[in-house]
Image (tube, helix red, strand yellow):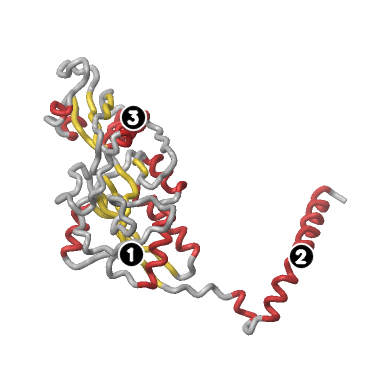
Amino acid sequence: MSSVRKTVSFLLLAAMLLLLVMLPKYASGLLSAHDPLEYFRPHKEAYSGTISIWHAVGFKPYSGSMGAWLEKYAKRIEKRHFGVFFDLKAMSAEEARTRIGKGEFPDIISFPAGLLQGSELRPMQLEAGEPDAVGGEKAPKAIPLAASCELILYCPDSTELPESGPSEEMAREFTFEQFKLGKAPCCICDVRGAGDMQRLLERNKAKLFSVMPFKTDTELVQYLGISQALSEEKEQYARELLELLMSSSAQNELAELGLLPLALTDEAEFEQSFLDEAYSLILENSGVITAPFKRAQPFEWNNGSEK
């Protein structure tokens, strides 16, 4: 007998043995069931239809997309529940504000500080073992998922700068656009700006620059909340998505994007050394400012809708 026939025979034998082991269990269940076809029908969900999600972008990660991160985990929930779908739309914070002003609102919303008043959202009761969300609340209306921060970018060979590097006051005299065009020796931007400059440098479209972490706090926090008007049938799926987004694997992916994960109990690892230094500076000073409903405007460094 050839080796191919031996292999096929072995696989068939293994399949037959597995069938002999498993068949009695399922056969007895089918025989005792009132409806034998029940085993082959999809599990009936509490809700069937579409759950809307908005990702209102206040800031972007060093690379990649937080919107794509959200959609990835929403798709996982869809696979678990037959007939349940998530419709995610990414938009700028300003677009979200305009649509809310027209009376629109999603079932679930990812938003930056200052976009909402708080009355639009319902409290979410946290289970034992989950981190407190805002101010130690056990039923917060907003769960902080990730944070960004400000950085100083500067040209190390510029004659306009002191040897010790630029101060925050000096860096704020220039805009990110001026620095990107080579018309300023330094500037302040968020981590996405640093990422954009690095990608320009790799294509030989920018001068050599350095990054200086300087902030001990940050208000650049992205939150997740659920609508006050969300139906009870949809709530369990919204809750399941939140738990998935707060899992260690999902939170570690935020660090890979260059954001500070806020629901991670382990130490985050960043590919860029300056991000590791920047976030260590913030964490050591307990500098993540979680005040989702107090800021009047979203972060000014937003570069448009995230795709």
Q: Is residue 275 above or below residue 119?
A: above
Q: Secondary structure at mark 2?
A: helix
Q: Is residue 208 above or below residue 272?
A: above
Q: Earlier in the sequence, mark 2 or mark 3?
A: 2
Residue 246: percent from left, percent from top: 41, 51
Asked whether residue 40 is in view, the answer is yes
Please give the name of the residue rendered at 37% of the width and 31% of the height, measured from the top-left corner.
272
Asked whether residue 54 is in view, the answer is no
Disc number at residue 21? 2
Residue 84: percent from left, percent from top: 43, 68
Going by the numbered disc 2, the residue's amino acid type is Val
Q: Secondary structure at mark 1?
A: strand
Q: Is residue 298 left or right of residue 142?
A: left
Q: Quadrant of residue 300?
A: top left
Please give the name of the residue rendered at 37% of the width and 44% of the height, measured from the top-left corner.
261
Please give the name of the residue rendered at 68% of the width and 78% of the height, measured from the top-left corner.
30
Going by the numbered disc 1, the residue's amino acid type is Ser
Q: Is residue 66 above or below residue 179?
A: below
Q: Which residue is mark 1?
A: 52
Q: Which residue is mark 3?
A: 277
As drawn, which residue projects farthest toward the left? 173
Going by the numbered disc 3, the residue's amino acid type is Glu
